[in-house]
Amino acid sequence: MTVHQNIPGRSTKARRALGVQALLEWAFRVEKAQLELPMPPDEANEGHGFGLEYVLLQRAQLGCRIDGGRYKPEASTHEDAETIAAIVAGLPDGLGGRRMAIRVAELARAGLTPDWMPGAVPRCVPVETRRNQHGERSVTVVVGTEQVFNRGRRRTVEVLACPVAWSPHPEQIAAARRAYVEWWQALGWVKDGMAQCDLLRHHKVTEVMPKVDPWQ
């Protein structure tokens, strides 16, 4: 096992300062970091090795980087990207746990922000329409009958109505924006984790965050 110590007096470059979202996209999209999630609780004590929290703790205590001796090609993932992936994997259950960790990583890998449905306004629209030679018409249904007099004669006529719905539904918009806020809260936890653990060697996280409510 090779231990890479920090040698006093060695010249070091200034760390690159980025916001948490930019760092996540660098780690997962550029460096192709892999999300190694902790084992479920029922498997954690079956001798499968140490979890990621243990690895991070040992790095912090040693103040150095440990090389286990495995071959690492030149194109291997940057150590800072691996550390960022490990922090994401440790998202607590109160913030979505494994599910949210996967979502954060997938969005970063794609360079995307959650769709909070910008500009969405509920509108009352026909449930169904049909197009003919006269254009597009709303589909109607029979909801009852009425008796009417026409030219002195009683006639039964159908009462028609056009079923309508809200599109998009207000709850659909609200759900999308709740999901965005949950993602934003997860990013805040990851940002604090990066800052507190101080294990990034070539990068540092800034306080820059996406807007918490961009729809306001």
Image: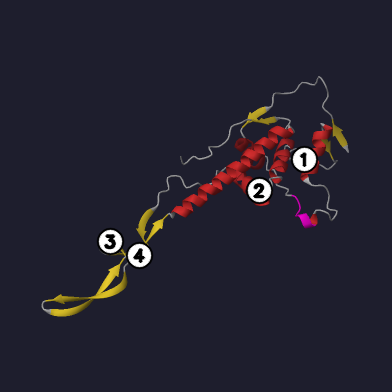
In which quadrant of the rendered view does residue 111 lie? top right
At 40% across and 52% down in the image, what residue appears? 122
49 is higher (above) or lower (below) than 196? below
Calculate the distance from the C-alpha at mark 2 to the C-alpha at mark 4: 41 Å
Is residue 159 among the parts visible in the rendering?
A: yes
Counting residues from the start of the chain, the first of labels 3 and 1 encountered is 1
At label 2, which amino acid type do we have?
Gly
In the structure shown, which secondary structural element does the residue marked by tag 1 occupy? loop
At label 3, which amino acid type do we have?
Gly
* Left or right: residue 101 compared with residue 61: left
Disc marking residue 94: 2
Counting residues from the start of the chain, the first of labels 4 and 1 encountered is 1
Residue 139 coordinates in the image, percent (x, y):
32, 66
Q: Residues within 10 Å of mark 4 (few under 14, many from 20)?
A: some
Calculate the distance from the C-alpha at mark 4 to the C-alpha at mark 3: 19 Å
- Please give the residue where the numbered disc 3 appears in the rendered image: 135
The reply to whether dot 1 and dot 2 touch (C-beta < 8 Å) is: no
- Please give the residue where the numbered disc 4 appears in the rendered image: 163
* Closer to us: 202 or 186: 186
In which quadrant of the rendered view does residue 58 lie? top right
* Closer to us: 156 or 120: 156
Calculate the distance from the C-alpha at mark 1 to the C-alpha at mark 2: 38 Å
Disc marking residue 73: 1
- Extent of the magenta region: 38-42
At label 4, which amino acid type do we have?
Pro
14 is higher (above) or lower (below) than 138? above
Q: Residues within 10 Å of mark 2 (few under 14, many from 20)?
A: few
In the structure shown, which secondary structural element does the residue marked by tag 3 occupy? strand
